[in-house]
Image (tube, rainbow, N blue to C red):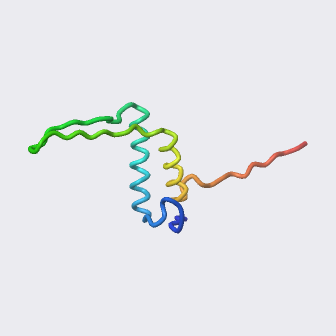
Amino acid sequence: MIDTSSGILAGMTEAQLRAALATAQKAYIDLQIGQKVVSVSYAQGNGSRSITYQPTDLPQITALIQAIQRQLGIGSSRRAVSFLYR
């Protein structure tokens, strides 16, 4: 069940959450395999432009992915742990 009433993801629709999850997972994979762009420079008709992307921490992306998954109810089932004493 999606809880859209609280947290940083409050107000997002299920479609928006799923799109955000896919984006975060792609960013995580890109960082893991070294495919993230850090700086891009290009020329336009009215001059040159430069965009710098800050590398994001893998733990921060992991936390975001887990928060979105919890919001969507993905992977939130917890198995009870039981011990058998003899």
Q: Position of residue 29 (x, y in %)?
A: 42, 38
Please name the residue shown 68% across and 51% down the image. Answer: 79
Please name the residue shown 44% across and 63% down the image. Answer: 14
Which residue is outermost to the top?
A: 34
Q: Is residue 80 above or below residue 55?
A: below
Q: Position of residue 5 (x, y in %)?
A: 52, 68
Indicate the quadrant containing the N terminus: top left, top right, bottom left or bottom right.
bottom right
Q: Is residue 55 above or below residue 76?
A: above
Q: Position of residue 39 (x, y in %)?
A: 29, 35
Which sits in the foreground, 85 or 71? 71
Which sits in the foreground, 84 or 13? 13
Please name the residue shown 53% across and 47% down the image. Answer: 63
Q: Position of residue 30 (x, y in %)?
A: 38, 37
Which residue is outermost to the front?
A: 47
Which residue is outermost to the right?
A: 86
Q: Is residue 63 left or right of residue 12?
A: right
Which residue is outermost to the left?
A: 45
Quadrant location of residue 18?
A: bottom left
Indicate the quadrant containing the C terminus: top left, top right, bottom left or bottom right.
top right
Quadrant location of residue 34?
A: top left
Which sits in the foreground, 82 or 21? 21
Q: Is residue 67 left or right of residue 28?
A: right
Q: Is residue 65 above or below residue 13?
A: above
Please name the residue shown 9% across and 44% down the image. Answer: 45
Q: Is residue 13 left or right of residue 85?
A: left
Query: How many numbered discs?
Result: 0
